[in-house]
């Protein structure tokens, strides 16, 4: 096998690459085919391929993919970026990473447990079945897996598997949740028809179950319950169920988020030992820390923020060798000094993975004693922090950086709007004394940092995010689009710089860490994008290697044209989703080679791991990252990635339910909308004013048959040629609302898109997109969670 130390004068042949990948196979299923896991960077290292030759290597790998000799499944599709070779390996083997989060769903004919991965994109086909390995000898204290439970599984090929058997076997690394999977619903009492239970799952919004009186368990009308089927018993055509657990009334102000919390199994009640431990935590002293309390750092956050992770400061660099340069200081709450590895708080923080933000409440990762008190950088109070000094040159590029364990005293707590108003000339009692000495230098540093950002050219999909304003009873009052201020961008830019510095330092010290990674778009998605762009006159060669700058060029070509919103939507959907991993394959969206989350340890466990890694690597204390194997940290990365996806789904569903409740009193009303998705089954629409998502079944598009044009993202009438295309503006009428499920059904009003066009015609002119209701980028939950 080639060694890294070899000096090669030419690129390897395709045969050599295939031979190498075969030798490096980590999964071999004899008689059924094989799956080989080998990263592009591993191939490059093995053949000592450097510099511009890596581009040629990437092209060769793409050609092998197009020839069907290897297949790549990206992080958004299966949790890993590794290329895989496939030779007849069925049951989804080629799409699986080494470690997955899976739900145990059934038993096979032999009584063995069978699981399916929690995350599995529909475009990959049916989710693979995984045979769960249960040791014959049970260790005392180790949980026994069962149907309905969730576990972290390490995968390997199933030995001697028959054609109908699962091709993969999963060994239980850790049980993630002991709660059995339950079907949730809302009790609806009807004297005429008897009790019913309405499903809360959006996919089954119209599903109802019959609830016999003797099986109600005392549940009242409007109560959220967990139910289970009564065998195959059916009454009036409905499946009969019994109440397994009463979960509370839905009449309270936090009822909607309660549904999401319970549906997704989000831990929301701290264990007694966790609260007791938090109550005993003492504030760290100055011992072992640099005293930075005289430095006028400030926090800049939303006006309703209760925890403050980060404080910032900037000043001119006085060094003679850096004329016009700036020194930016980013101080982050030192949560590692408050939460010990392996402690009760730490174990529960791993389970939660991150804080979850609903419109009506926050489910924190850490108890309030830590998250909003001792760990929060409150103004004019001594607080421990881990800080980084970033020295920027006049062109905005980072020259050097250094990390420090410090004690700070924030000079002020500012909101984004408050800081921006001061810069724009409207100071108040808090910002006036800080304007010249604190705020103006921060903006100066942001301006020069922007020069380096422009050179780096990250993906520029800056889409507005909508916010729900609630009434006192927890229902929606209105939907607003907060203005995107320079103050937001300033904090975001400084946080990115700090995150990069953390990753660079840990790599330099050869310290294991959890990276924040974002893979490039898959070849399949790029080809689909190319086909779509051709329909609007933009050529993009298939198989072309794209960087964020090329995507920005496409977006720039359509800016302020009738295609702007449409192209932004399609480019957005071509992107992968970010995740956490111990193996680094870069951050495509930010166009960074190395990146780690460092700036929010109060609300993200990944950041706490990075803090501990820095403390250990730099000798900043005895509470650093304990000895841990890469595979163990990899398992943690998989768990917190799954927790992040769980939180995103819960937050999205809560917003859907709140808006559906808001619109439920407007049945029959018409709304301006855009087509946000086109499928064979019908159209997904997004309302312009509220951002609400709904569905128009294909049968309700008109009095003719509509065929699905996949490359053009359109439905085309076979008789009239009337075309509904992704991004179209049209008027829809609300037909049905299911608030409990968050589902809305519409029909087309006024015949179709404005100035309905014939199939194949260029999209009609329309107003420049306002971005209203656009979903967040798939590689971030919010701009400060990249």
Image (tube, rainbow, N blue to C red):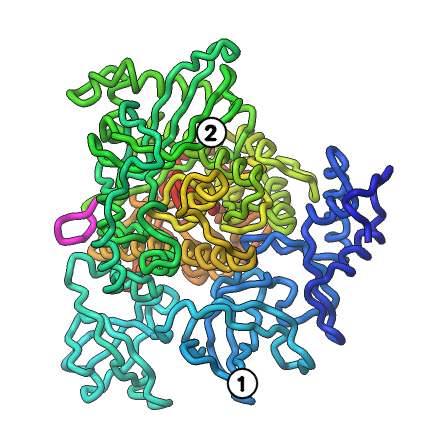
Disc 1 versus disc 2: nearer the observer: 2
Task: Work out whether mark 1 precedes mark 2 in sequence or the reverse, and give the earlier one.
Answer: 1
Q: Is residue 15 magenta?
A: no
Q: Residue at x 54, y 45 (%)?
A: 511
Relative height, residue 676 to residue 248 (above, below) = above
> Horizontally, is 332 left or right of 543 in the view?
left
> Horizontally, is 495 left or right of 56 in the view?
left
* Quadrant placement of the C terminus: top left
Residue 95 occupies which quadrant of the picture?
bottom right
Relative height, residue 696 to residue 93 (above, below) = above
Relative height, residue 302 to residue 37 (above, below) = above
Q: What is the secondary structure assignment of the residue under circle 2? A: strand
| Residue 689 location (% of width, % of height) | 30, 42
Residue 498 in view of the camera:
yes
Please report the bounds of the magenta region as a residue range: 469-476
Label 2: few (<14), some or many (≥20) within 10 Å? few
The one nearer the camera, 175 or 381, is 381
Q: Residue at x 22, y 27 (%)?
A: 412
| Residue 171 location (% of width, % of height) | 55, 73
Q: Residue at x 73, y 48 (%)?
A: 62
Q: Which residue is mark 2?
A: 402
> Horizontally, is 81 left or right of 488 in the view?
right
Q: Which residue is mark 1?
A: 136
Residue 675 in view of the camera:
no
| Residue 265 location (% of width, % of height) | 34, 65
> Horizontally, is 225 left or right of 688 in the view?
left
Q: What is the secondary structure assignment of the residue under circle 1? A: loop
* Residue sitting at the far front: 287
């Amino acid at each position: 096998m080639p060694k890294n130390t070899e000096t090669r004068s030419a690129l390897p042949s395709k045969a050599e690459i295939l031979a190498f990948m075969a030798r490096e196979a980590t999964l071999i299923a004899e008689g059924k085919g094989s799956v080989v896991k080998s990263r592009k960077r591993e191939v490059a290292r093995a053949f000592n391929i450097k510099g511009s030759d890596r581009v040629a290597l990437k092209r060769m790998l793409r050609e092998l993919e197009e020839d069907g000799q290897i297949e790549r499944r990206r992080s958004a599709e299966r949790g890993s970026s590794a290329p895989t070779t496939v030779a007849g390996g069925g049951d989804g083997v080629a799409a699986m990473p080494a470690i997955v989060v899976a739900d145990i769903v059934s038993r096979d004919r032999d009584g063995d447990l069978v699981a399916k991965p929690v995350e599995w994109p529909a475009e990959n086909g049916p989710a693979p079945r995984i045979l769960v390995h249960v040791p014959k000898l049970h260790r005392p204290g180790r949980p026994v897996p069962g149907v309905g439970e969730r576990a972290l599984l390490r995968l390997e090929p199933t030995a001697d598997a028959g054609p109908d058997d699962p091709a993969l076997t999963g060994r239980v690394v850790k049980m993630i949740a002991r709660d059995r999977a339950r079907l949730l619903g809302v009790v609806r009492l009807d004297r005429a028809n008897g009790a019913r239970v309405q499903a809360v799952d959006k996919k089954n919004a119209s599903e109802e179950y019959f609830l016999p009186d003797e099986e109600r368990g005392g549940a009242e009308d409007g109560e959220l319950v967990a139910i289970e089927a009564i065998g195959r018993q059916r009454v009036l055509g409905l499946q009969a169920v019994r109440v397994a657990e009463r979960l509370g009334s839905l009449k309270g102000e936090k009822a909607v988020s309660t549904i999401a919390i319970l549906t997704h199994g989000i831990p929301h009640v701290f264990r007694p030992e966790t609260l007791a431990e938090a109550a005993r935590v003492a504030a760290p002293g100055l011992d072992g820390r640099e005293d930075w309390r005289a430095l006028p750092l400030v926090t800049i956050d939303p006006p309703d923020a209760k925890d403050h992770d980060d404080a910032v400061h900037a000043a001119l660099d006085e060094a003679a060798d850096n004329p016009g340069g700036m020194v930016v200081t980013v101080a982050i709450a030192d949560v590692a000094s408050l939460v010990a590895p392996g402690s009760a708080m730490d174990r529960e923080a791993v389970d939660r993975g991150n804080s979850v933000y609903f419109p009506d409440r926050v489910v924190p990762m850490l108890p309030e004693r830590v998250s909003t008190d001792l760990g929060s950088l409150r103004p004019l109070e001594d607080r421990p922090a881990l800080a980084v000094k970033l020295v920027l040159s006049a062109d905005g590029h980072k020259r050097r950086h250094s990390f420090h364990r410090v004690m700070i005293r924030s000079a002020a707590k500012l909101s984004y709007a408050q800081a921006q108003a001061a810069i724009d000339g409207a100071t108040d009692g808090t910002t006036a004394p800080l304007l010249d000495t604190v705020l103006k230098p921060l903006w100066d540093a942001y301006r020069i940092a922007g020069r380096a950002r422009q050179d780096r050219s990250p993906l520029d999909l800056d889409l507005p995010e909508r916010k729900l304003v609630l009434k006192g009873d927890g229902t929606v009052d209105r939907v607003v689009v907060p203005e995107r201020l320079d103050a937001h961008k300033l904090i975001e830019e400084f946080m990115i710089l700090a995150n990069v510095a953390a990753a660079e330092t840990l790599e330099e010290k050869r310290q294991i860490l959890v990276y924040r990674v974002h893979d490039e778009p898959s070849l399949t998605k790029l080809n689909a994008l190319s086909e779509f762009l051709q329909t609007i006159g933009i050529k993009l060669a298939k198989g072309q290697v794209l960087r964020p700058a090329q995507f920005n060029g496409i977006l720039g070509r359509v800016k302020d044209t009738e295609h702007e919103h449409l192209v932004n939507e399609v480019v957005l959907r071509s992107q992968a989703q970010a995740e956490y991993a111990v193996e680094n394959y870069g951050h495509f969206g930010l166009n960074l080679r190395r990146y780690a989350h460092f700036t929010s340890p109060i609300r993200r466990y990944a950041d706490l791991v990075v803090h501990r890694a820095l403390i250990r690597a730099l000798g900043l204390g005895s509470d650093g990252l304990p000895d841990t194997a890469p595979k163990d940290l990899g398992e943690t990365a998989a768990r917190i990635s799954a927790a992040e996806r769980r939180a995103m789904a819960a937050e999205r569903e809560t917003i859907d339910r709140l808006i559906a409740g808001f619109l439920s009193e407007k049945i029959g009303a018409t709304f301006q909308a855009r087509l946000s998705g086109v499928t064979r089954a019908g159209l997904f629409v997004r309302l312009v004013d509220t951002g609400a998502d709904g569905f128009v079944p294909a049968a309700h598009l008109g009095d003719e048959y509509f065929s699905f044009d996949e490359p053009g993202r359109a439905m085309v009438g076979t008789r009239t040629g009337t075309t509904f295309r992704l991004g179209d503006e049209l008027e829809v009428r609300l037909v049905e609302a299911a608030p409990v499920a968050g589902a809305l059904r519409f029909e087309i009003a006024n015949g179709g898109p404005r100035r309905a066009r014939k199939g194949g015609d260029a999209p009609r002119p329309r107003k420049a997109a306002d971005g209203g209701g656009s979903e967040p980028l798939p590689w971030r939950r919010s701009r400060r969670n990249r």
